[in-house]
Image (cartoon, rainbow, N blue to C red):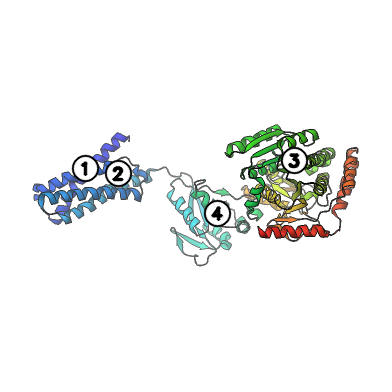
Amino acid sequence: MDYKKRYIVFFAVDSVIVLTAIYISYWLLHPTFHMYANEVLFISAITLLVSHHATASLFQLYNRVWAVASVHELVIVGYAVTISVVMAMLIQKGINGNIYFRVMVITWLLHIVMIGGSRFLLRMLSDRQRLKYEGEKKRVLIVGAGKAGAMLARNISRNPLNEYTIVGYVDDDMNKVSLKLMEYRVLGTTEEIPTIVKNKGVQKIIIAIPSLKQGQIKELYDHCTVTKAKVKVMPKIEDVMTGKVSVSDMQEIDIEHLLGREEVKLDMVAIAEKLTGKTVLVTGAGGSIGSEICRQVMTFNPAKLVLLGHGENSIYMISMELQKNFTGETAIIPVIADIQDRKRIFEVIEEYQPDVIYHAAAHKHVPLMEYNPREAVKNNIFGTKNVAEAAHTYNVGNFVMISTDKAVNPPNVMGATKRIAEMIVQNLAKESKTKFAAVRFGNVLGSRGSVIPLFTQQIAAGGPLTVTHPDMTRYFMTIPEAAKLVLQAGTLGGNGEIFVLDMGEPVKIVDLARNLIKLSGFTEDEIKVEFTGLRPGEKMYEELLNKEEIQEDQVFPGIYVGRAMPLNKNKLDEIIISLAKMDNSSMKELLINETSKQCMTKEILNSKESDEIEFLNKENQKI
């Protein structure tokens, strides 16, 4: 119905109600038909009609969408009716000397009921006529009988297009068990989920406890995985309240939920002092780690962010993303350069004079580097040497190198080259004004070369998932978490420390594969896991520090500093010069022998290094 027709209908309906209500009120008090001859009632009815349409125009009662009306609209009707009734009472007082008070009170009530009711009848009809979900509804169990659970149940119940039928709640608060919330019963505790799912025919479980910690989600997920029901998570309340998502935008449980790791809390003041208003250069800026470091850096509003990388497409993509998503005054400067090109790297650092360098460029794929050791040496060793020495030459304030847990007791080329790169940084720190440090961490979920994208592709292809060994374990963290801790580590020390990120507990790769199969909605009968044997250069398990390197105290929550001892500068230079002249086989042998021997050193920190660790801890406590 168009606006003109709606207006005419509302005008006519309200006119009939207003003209007849006062006569009905009088008749209820004085059951006689002589009321039509009552001049005061006639004048009152005309007054009500005129004043009602005037107030209806004032409050725009004819311009509202009554199909979605709420209590607010009913209050507006109350204002309009009250004003029109008061006007009629004043007219009665003027022409008759008194007011038909009881008649006017009943008239007011009839106006509220009949005018307001006519509007809300439209809403009821609209609700009944809405499209309803035509498929078979899924039976849902809500985990959490709190505010979030009630909000979710209300949203599901009121949405005619929802695909769910709620069977009830589970909650570990025993005081809530057997009680009702939003007409649905709390059926038991989370430990009873398998039984409830079986007895109630539950097809989907929705976790509606936004305050759950990551470790608790994993524990809860373990209860759910013994069932065939799919598991989803309600979005965070703050995201719902800010309009980022709706209550019904359920999130899939992903592998990050199952790592059991809590959100990293940073010392924002210390990081801001290093980055805000400064020039920051990131090597490998187009890679998974480098690009995330760029995103994190941008939140601190540097004056310039130099994106340095070898691949033009990846640098273009991160440059465009940052320009689109960040609207501050930071100058985003894409630079195409190869860290192996010493002259070019020195030119770039001389031109932009960065205050901070995050060196993320590296070859990281273990089996590939076993087949291509010369490329690993050129990129990871000589490339790092070029960037680090340029930073030293041009007095860059801070230099942070991204390293890897594979640099510990390395049996492979990639790990060995990264360990030598660490030693380059450590030795430079002894003679430079630049504050050098390295940050060592394990596998990063979703990064290039990570096992997660490979497993995802294998699941999409129908399997099987290939795991090298049933007992193989790895440390994992998310890309944003790794980038945040890199920024934080950059504010600590600077005397050649090797900072080690707390990676939590190591995860069995086979468990990761099985969890991904379940998260994808399959069973191990549908998608198999096959064991293929260790690949060249692979270890059964990774270490973040060897036994002699372990420093028990954290210098910041989630960050340790290791005791890794470098080769002396002369010896290291000899090895680096030799590597350039060797064939692949000799190169691999030298790399692994020298780095493993040095990584296994049993030297204890000298007093100077011990003082540095103690100083870092005291400084952090002050913060």
Q: Amino acid at mark 4?
A: Ile
Q: Position of residue 357 (x, y in %)?
A: 72, 43
User: What is the distance, in whole Å, between disc 2 and disc 1 at their CAs?
Assistant: 16 Å
- Residue position for label 4: 205
Q: Amino acid at mark 3?
A: Ala
What residue sits 58% from the left and 39% below the top?
Answer: 328
The answer to which of marks 2 and 4 sits earlier in the sequence is: 2
The answer to which of marks 3 and 4 sits earlier in the sequence is: 4
What residue sits 83% from the left and 52% below the top?
Answer: 409
Q: Which is nearer the eye, 586 or 221? A: 586
Seen in the image, is 245 located left or right of residue 399? Answer: left
The answer to which of marks 3 and 1 sits earlier in the sequence is: 1
Front of the two marks 2 and 4 = 2
User: What is the distance, in whole Å, between disc 3 and disc 4 at their CAs?
Assistant: 43 Å
User: What is the distance, in whole Å, between disc 3 and disc 1 at their CAs?
Assistant: 78 Å
Contact between labelled residues 4 and 3, with CB atoms less than 8 Å apart: no
Up the image or down, 581 lies above or below 483; here it is above
User: What is the distance, in whole Å, between disc 2 and disc 3 at their CAs?
Assistant: 65 Å
- Residue position for label 2: 59
What is the secondary structure assignment of the residue under circle 1?
helix
User: What is the distance, in whole Å, between disc 4 and disc 1 at their CAs?
Assistant: 53 Å
Is residue 473 visible in the rendered structure shown here? Answer: no
What is the secondary structure assignment of the residue under circle 2?
loop
Q: Quadrant of the C terminus?
A: bottom right
- Residue position for label 3: 361
Front of the two marks 3 and 1 = 3
The answer to which of marks 4 and 1 sits earlier in the sequence is: 1
On the image, which quarter does residue 279 sit in?
top right
What is the secondary structure assignment of the residue under circle 4?
strand
What residue sits 66% from the left and 59% below the top?
Answer: 622
Front of the two marks 2 and 1 = 2
